[in-house]
Image: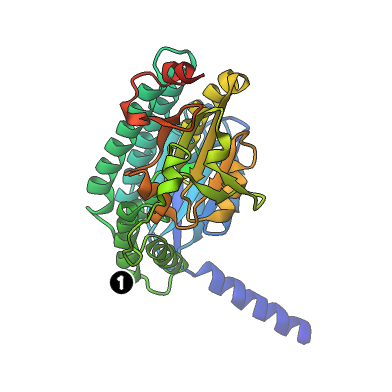
Amino acid sequence: MKKIFFMALAAVALSACNSEPKFKVEGEVSGADGKMLYLEASALEGIVPLDSVKLKSGGSFAFKQVRPVSPEFYRLRVDDKVINFSIDSTETVQISAPYTDFATAYTVEGSPNCTKIKELTMKQMQLQNKVNVLLQSMQGHKIGADVFEDSLAALLKSYKDEVKINYIFAAPNTAAAYFALFQKLNNYLIFDPLNSKDDIKCFAAVATSLNNYYPHADRSKNLYNIVIKGMKNTRTPQQKVVEIPEEAISETGVIDISLRDMKGNVRKLSELKGKAVILDFTIYQSAVSASHNYMLRDLYDKYAGQGLEIYQVSLDADEHYWKTTADNLPWVCVRDANGIYSSVAASYNVQGVPSLFLINKNNELSVRGENVKDLEAAVKSLL
């Protein structure tokens, strides 16, 4: 009798589960006979496997999953090729793709949000390709470091301006707007929620909309927390006059800097007298950081043996991120905990990052980076 009772309970539970509203994603992947196709959730905690199927010659597939309580993100994956999409409720999304260009040549129907996500994905790939071409041109000495930096900044600004207008502020209550916030370039977030006041406004717009529609959703709460942290990091402190001791300038020829490195040791800029120095203000947690540091590494590898040193000041809000990223850099890496409100950066009239200065062997400020036409030639002239 007990056995029959428990079997009946299990049947009821299974029936209840099967009766829950579901979404469906279906379509075909051509040229992938025998390949495994995976459906995965792109959750806050990471990628979560949901289902899989071994594709046959026709490549057709169909997955069903319980609908999310608020807009969520999923992905189809074959090998290391990925298609991202979102689900709002119980919609059916059709996705078709060739195996060869699975992540770029797919078509999607049944969801305006998924169409927007594809557009954003393609735009991000185009941006990454343009940045890669720039980097290769600099590595091949076809363009100078100054042209590289200016072109990189222009590309990034153009991309962010377009995405802000057409995807984030145009419809902040959509999954596509949320997706746009977390796109990456060189594996760094394009929109910086911790260090950029302008970018935090984008996060705040989406957070406000999500909170209005889905106040109890984990993504809403997480995005709200990110915005609060970013606002705290970039809150303007009480204004105070930056006082620079006269001897700090007259004795060294530059405004001296005294900050701690990753090991907690105080490193002074003035201690590098006798070397040609690139003084660099940067934020490691920015989309241009990797390319910028690659440019510096190229110069350092060439001229460190001839007396070049780099004194790099991080303005990152996240100390742990700075330590992790800067750990393998061969030059002097220090951090100002005041971030973008650094009095040191203010004393050098830093308006944006990355921003660099050249200092000669006598500890005299030679030139600001933006006034240099050929950075490598300028460095060589100081050695």
Relative image position of residue 248 (x, y in whole percent): 45, 46
Relative image position of residue 142 (x, y in whole percent): 41, 12
- Relative depth, front residue between 41 and 269: 269
- Side (left or right) of 175 relative to 185: left
At x 29% / y 38%, what residue is drawn?
Answer: 157
Q: Using the rendered view, name the quadrant where residue 138 is placed.
A: top left
Residue 184 in view (yes/no):
no
Vertical arrangement, residue 170 with respect to residue 187, above or below: below
Crowding at dot 1, Cα within 10 Å, few <14 / some 14-19 / many 20+, comes out as few
**Residue underneath mark 1:** 212
At x 36% / y 52%, what residue is drawn?
Answer: 196
Quadrant for the N terminus, please: bottom right
- Relative depth, front residue between 257 and 290: 257
At x 60% / y 76%, what residue is drawn?
Answer: 13
Relative image position of residue 234 (x, y in whole percent): 37, 60
- Side (left or right) of 63 relative to 146: right
Residue 147 in view (yes/no):
yes
Q: Using the rendered view, name the quadrant where residue 353 is placed.
A: top left
Q: Using the rendered view, name the quadrant where residue 153 is placed.
A: top left
Vertical arrangement, residue 93 with respect to residue 367, above or below: below
- The amino acid type, in three-letter code, at marker 1 is Asn
Relative image position of residue 238 (x, y in whole percent): 33, 67
What colour scheme governs how the chains and residues are painted in the rendered image of this protein? rainbow
- Relative depth, front residue between 131 and 30: 131
